Image (spheres, rainbow, N blue to C red):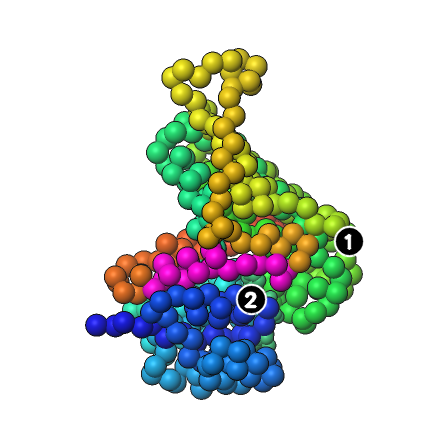
Amino acid sequence: MINELRFGIIGCGSISHTHAEQIGLINGAKLVAVADVEEDRAKSLAERYEADWYADYHEMLKREDIDIINILTPSGMHADMAIAAAQAGKHVITEKPMDVSLDKAHEMIQVCKDAGVKLAVISQHRFDTSTVKVKEKVESGKFGNMILGECAVNWYRTQEYYDSGEWRGTWALDGGGALMNQSIHTIDLLQYLMGPVESVFARKATLAHERMEVEDVAVATVSFKNGALGTIVGTTSAFPGLSSRLEVFGTKGSAVIENDQLTHHYEKTTDSKGEWYGGGKVENLASQSEEASNGTGSSDPTAIFGGAHRIQIEDMIQAVLENREPLVNGEEGLKPLEVILAIYESARTGKSVSL
Ligand SMILES: NC(=O)c1ccc[n+]([C@@H]2O[C@H](COP(=O)([O-])OP(=O)(O)OC[C@H]3O[C@@H](n4cnc5c(N)ncnc54)[C@H](O)[C@@H]3O)[C@@H](O)[C@H]2O)c1
């Protein structure tokens, strides 16, 4: 019987510390090796977490004592690395977005299936207490028919942030800007709670930064397959970095998640009174547990704490042990990517784009 799953990390930059630390906190998980083309980064992460290090990740993939590979490199590299890991027989956890190209994302799903390995795509906020609660309300019909979903990620990133890595702000490796890199979490939650997106109509612009190819402001209207409507706003130009906000409304209830906390929740009961003018009793359930609470990253990209990452890594461990799909598998990871790429196409063509 397997009693310990062993991890290897590719990419020892900002988010690698969250993964390494959280793996270290899980009983039955061990980080055994890390790889980065920047040897200093690989060495320093390896020393801190008592792992071996490699400059060439292909060498690390040859090790037989690694079960799961975490891919934490620039987004446009994820699919190629996932494919190499799967072909080496390793299960794969990849950071979001799963890749920047839909074709590549489909290929990585297929290769993982063919190799018989699990694929999980990080979308840690699906594991937040707030999200779990609202999802349960929507699924159980407590909110009635869903009619409106809005999300706004009004964040800020400095020019230095975009200058800090050659891949940042490029189409080839970041795959997009405020939406693909920062707002993807909230866009994923929007479609997770409201249901699949049918079409989008969008505009995007680069207004507050230089030396970047991608957007720092984008807005879109959304039609969901169930007939509901919605909006998406994402920016990295909202100085000095405000909130990420998600609001979902059904015929019998509504919820607001702000900075990952459930700040408003209301559902109609048989004795609900005083609602004719919108005066229904609002129950405030700001009850996000510390456990799953992540830093918001509204102005500081390093302010991402790891609790929800840990829960998602634990889900992958259970998926491997029980031979089931992880909660956010490749098909789930595709959904926000499809929405964001449709928004970019709509903004480019000036036309509504169906998914
Ligand atoms: N889930 C989250 O909240 C979250 C937060 C931050 C970043 N991310 C995602 O994590 C990924 C990495 O982001 P980051 O901010 O840590 O970037 P980063 O630039 O800080 O780190 C990326 C690392 O990958 C390394 N690398 C590049 N090419 C490589 C190769 N061929 N082999 C091995 N290593 C290579 C770089 O040298 C660098 O150290 C991105 O996809 C990003 O979207 C997710």
Magenta stretch: helix, strand or loop mostly: helix
Farthest residue in the left direction?
1
Q: Is residue 68 magenta?
A: no
Q: Position of residue 229 (x, y in %)?
A: 53, 33
Tell me what residue is drawn at x 49 percent, y 68 percent: 21
Q: State the SS at label 1.
A: loop
- Mark 2 C-beta to ligand 1 under 8 Å: yes
- Type of amino acid at the residue the image marks with label 1: Ala
| Residue 189 vs residue 31, the one in the foreground | 31
Q: Position of residue 237 (x, y in %)?
A: 73, 51
Q: Position of residue 209 (x, y in %)?
A: 77, 57
| Residue 220 vs residue 323, the one in the foreground | 323
Q: State the SS at label 2.
A: loop
Q: Where is mark 1, residue-wise?
A: 208
- Type of amino acid at the residue the image marks with label 2: Ile
Does 181 sit left or right of 262 as displayed? Answer: right
Residue 15, disc: 2
Q: CA distance from mark 1 to mark 2?
A: 25 Å
Residue neighbourhood size for the residue with mark 2, other residues' Cα within 10 Å, grouped as few (<14), some (14–19), many (≥20):
some
| Residue 90 vs residue 255, the one in the foreground | 255
Quadrant of residue 321 in the image? bottom left
| Residue 71 vs residue 99, the one in the foreground | 71
Magenta part of the protein: which range? 301-317
- Mark 1 C-beta to ligand 1 under 8 Å: no
Q: Identify the mark nearer the N-term, 1 or 2.
A: 2
Q: Is residue 305 magenta?
A: yes
Query: Would you say the residues marked 1 and 2 are in contact, meaning their CB atoms lie under 8 Å apart?
Result: no
Q: Is residue 20 above or below residue 209?
A: below
Does 138 sit left or right of 319 as displayed? Answer: right
Residue neighbourhood size for the residue with mark 1, other residues' Cα within 10 Å, grouped as few (<14), some (14–19), many (≥20):
some
Q: Is residue 336 above or below residue 140?
A: below
Tell me what residue is drawn at x 66 percent, y 58 percent: 300
